[in-house]
Image (spheres, helix red, strand yellow):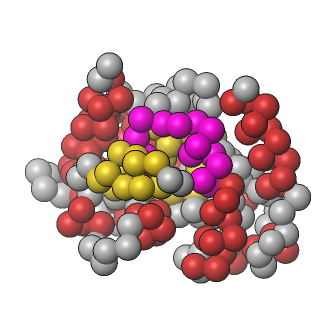
Amino acid sequence: MKKEKLDKLKQECLECKQCPLGETRINVVFSDGNAKTAKAILIGEAPGENEDKTGTPFVGRAGKLLNEFLEKAGISRENDLYIINTVKCRPPKNRVPTDEEKKSCEKFLLNQIEIINPKILIFCGATALKSFYDKKIPISKIRGEILELEIGGRKRKCIPIFHPSYLLRYHSTEEGSPRYLMLEDLIKIKTLLDEK
Ligand code: URA
């Protein structure tokens, strides 16, 4: 049933021209991961150049770094996660999506969340966090915290984490460094996913 619902939603999404991003995209970047087995939805910012070319989220440099961190934490990208972005089409020159663009894409995202019904939503980076959380708190202050937020009329467990693009700028893995904290957060998420 999940599959049929998602296929229908994807078809709608492939035809969407509701915002200007629909005019400049090569591909709609609908999702990656296994809708049947995913226990968490990871929400990134927006597709970049590689994602636009391939139609798959997080396949560029940031995506490769994300894969490395997931593997270290023991989270399977293929089985444990369903990966999406706040918008399904690439903003020109990789700018941050506008509130209007996010709003017009929201129904797809909320439908995906409802259909998958994950244990946890992972907000990957400040743009995803801001889309669901209205308090002005930097991601560095709130990452790793479990937030109970009302999303699509249901209370959901959400955890913000750093965006891997940010980690590309900081190479240290020393205690307290962004990379150290990212791994710590993902290990915490893995523990939550494994809980019965
Ligand atoms: N950055 C994102 O936020 N999402 C992607 O899909 C790729 C890079």
Name the side, left or right, on which 130 lies relative to 29: left
Which residue occupies the extreme left position in the image?
175
Relative height, residue 31 to residue 176 (above, below): above
Name the side, left or right, on which 137 lies relative to 9: left
Which residue occupies the extreme top position in the image?
196
| Pick the front one: 66 or 117 | 117
Quadrant in which the N terminus is drawn: top right
Where is residue 18 shown, x and y percent of the image?
80, 72
Q: Is residue 12 visible?
A: yes
Q: Quadrant of residue 191?
A: top left
Q: Quadrant of residue 37?
A: top right
Quadrant in which the C terminus is drawn: top left
Where is residue 99 shown, x and y percent of the image?
57, 79
Looking at the image, which residue is at 38% across and 67% down?
Answer: 133
Residue range in magenta is 109-123
Where is residue 112 shown, x and y percent of the image?
63, 46
Relative height, residue 105 to residue 192 (above, below): below
Looking at the image, which residue is at 13% across and 56% down?
Answer: 176
| Pick the front one: 119 or 124 | 119
Where is residue 96 shown, x and y percent of the image?
55, 76
**Residue 112 among those drawn in magenta:** yes
Looking at the image, which residue is at 48% across and 36% down?
Answer: 118
Which residue occupies the extreme front position in the image?
153
Name the side, left or right, on which 33 lies relative to 7: left
**Residue 108 among those drawn in magenta:** no
| Pick the front one: 86 or 169 | 86
